[in-house]
Amino acid sequence: MPTRYQKALDGAGVSDYIAIDKKGHYQNRFHPENIITRNELENVRAKETGWESKTERNNARKSSEYKRWIRGSLDSKAPLIMDRNEFEKLYIAAKNDNDFNNTDANGPFAQLLVKVGLRDEGATYPVGQTPKKGKR
């Protein structure tokens, strides 16, 4: 038997919910009987991005590794041209794919490096094996 929370989230996204009171309750626009709390909505938001839960997302955002990626992307010469959700999707994909150790030229880690401006777009060489400037 699914719980109230599972039934409320069945196929619903964050944009399907609207605030109904100041206590932090949200109602599904298409299924008014489905009402969830703000914390449950935050879990939906985190899952849409690729995290397991809001707690996992919050813990990752506090980690030095995550902060180093954010700082590195802001310090790179190429501007960060993506929103935080897009960054987190790429970050999660790279982390889940062998914990940033996949050196495939077209893998998730390479895509993250391209998006944050630390790798040339269209590069065919493996991550970590950047050729000398004249040979790219």
Image: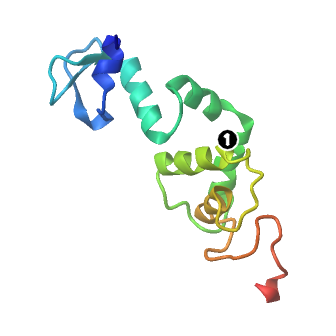
User: Which residue is rendered at x = 50% and y = 26% of the image?
Assistant: 54
Is 15 drawn above or below residue 129 in the view shown?
above
User: Which residue is rendered at x = 22% and y = 19% of the image?
Assistant: 34
Where on the picture, by quarter, is residue 6?
A: top left
Report whether 85 appears left or right of 109. Answer: left
Q: Quadrant of the C terminus?
A: bottom right
Viewer-closest of 63 and 12? 12
Where on the picture, by quarter, is residue 111?
A: bottom right
Q: Residue 33, how many percent across, how many down?
A: 16, 16
Q: Residue 72, how many percent across, how many down?
A: 69, 54
Q: How is the image coloured?
A: rainbow
Would you name the residue on which mark 1 appears? 66
Q: Residue 66, how many percent across, how many down?
A: 67, 41
Is 54 drawn above or below residue 73 in the view shown?
above
User: Which residue is rendered at x = 28% and y = 11% of the image?
Assistant: 23
User: Which residue is rendered at x = 80% and y = 83% of the image?
Assistant: 133
